[in-house]
Every structure is written in structure tokens, then in C-alpha cells.
Amino acid sequence: MKIIVGADQGGFELKAFIQMKLEEKGHKVKNMGLDETISIDYPDKAEEVCQALLEEKADLAILFCGTGIGICIAANKIQGIRAAHLSDEYSARMAKKHNDANVICLGGRTLGPELAWSIVEAFINAEFEGGRHLRRVDKIMALEGKN
Ligand code: RB5
């Protein structure tokens, strides 16, 4: 898979760990920073990474901030994005199987690295089920034009 990763100062260490694990598994990873502790505003990183995901037709973007919450809220304001904030493996599977998320968001200050990796693996190894879930996902995306 082609996967883009990006983080603010609250998530860049977890990002580096997840990038290493993804590359070990053979995924092609584009790292859009941060790679050091400088203070940025997470909506800017969400916008930058999500635009790249859409323009480059990557398979997935993974965003990291302190909790994963702020960067997820920001990502979901961008047309074409379905971002899921994840903190357990069951939700990770469902985020792909039922919601067909194209962005997942993780908290660098709330998740240990091994739990975060098991969440990422659970998401990547699941498949969108389509059917009635496609109808619902289509309705989610239609909300972008309505509101
Ligand atoms: C930055 O300190 C922090 O607010 C951010 O990483 C994130 O947790 C926001 O939701």
C-alpha cells in the first residue's frame, strides 16, 4: 500500500515507530513530518497530508497528534476525507469494514507504540464490506454538499 504519514509535536515519535513498522512490512510510506519538536498547528498538518492523499491517490493517510482528536476533527472538514479516530483494534476493523475510512488518526500521548501498531495492522488487514455500508458511506459523502 502507498501510505502517507504526518504528525504534530504531540505525535511525531509514534509516527516514526509506525513508519518503521509499515516499511518493515513492505509498504511504501511518504513521511510529511514533523520529525522534531517544533510547535505547529495540527489543522495545517491535517490539510497538507489530506491534500496529498487525494492528489496522489494514496491508499491511506495516518495522522498523529497528542490525542488524535484535533487532527481528526480537522481532517474531516476536508472534502473527500473520512477520518477515523482509533484507540482499539475492533474499531480499527470496523472503520474499514463499515466506514471505508481513508484516514486514521492516532494519539501519540494516549497510545503505546505496540497497541498503536496493532490498531494500524487491524485496519490495513480489514476490507470494506460494501453493500448497505456503501449506501451509508455515500450518504456521509453527500452531506459535504448539503451543509
Ligand atoms: C498539541 O499540544 C495538542 O493539542 C495536539 O497534539 C492534539 O492533542 C490536539 O488534539
Image (cartoon, grey):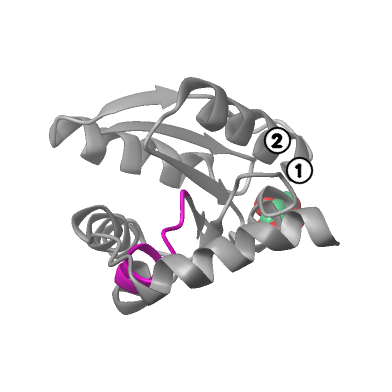
In the rendering, which numbered label is found on residue 47? 2
Closest to the observer, 115 or 119? 119
Relative to residue 100, is residue 91 depicted above or below?
below
Q: Which residue is mark 1?
A: 43
Q: Secondary structure at mark 1?
A: helix
Give the x, y percent position of residue 118. Answer: 24, 62
Q: Is residue 146 above or below residue 52?
A: below
For label 2, being within 8 Å of ligand 1 is answered no
Q: In this view of the protein, can residue 4 be seen by the observer?
A: yes
Disc 2 marks a residue whose amino acid type is Glu
The residues colored magenta run 93-102
- Residue reaching furthest right? 147
* Near-viewer residue (119 or 59): 59
Q: Can the viewer see residue 109 in this picture?
A: no
Task: Tell me residue 128's x, y (percent).
Answer: 30, 61
The image quarter in which residue 87 lies: bottom left
Q: Quadrant of the N terminus?
A: top left
Q: Amino acid at mark 1?
A: Pro
Q: Element type at marker 2?
A: helix
Instruction: State yes or no: discs 1 and 2 in contact (Cβ < 8 Å).
Output: yes
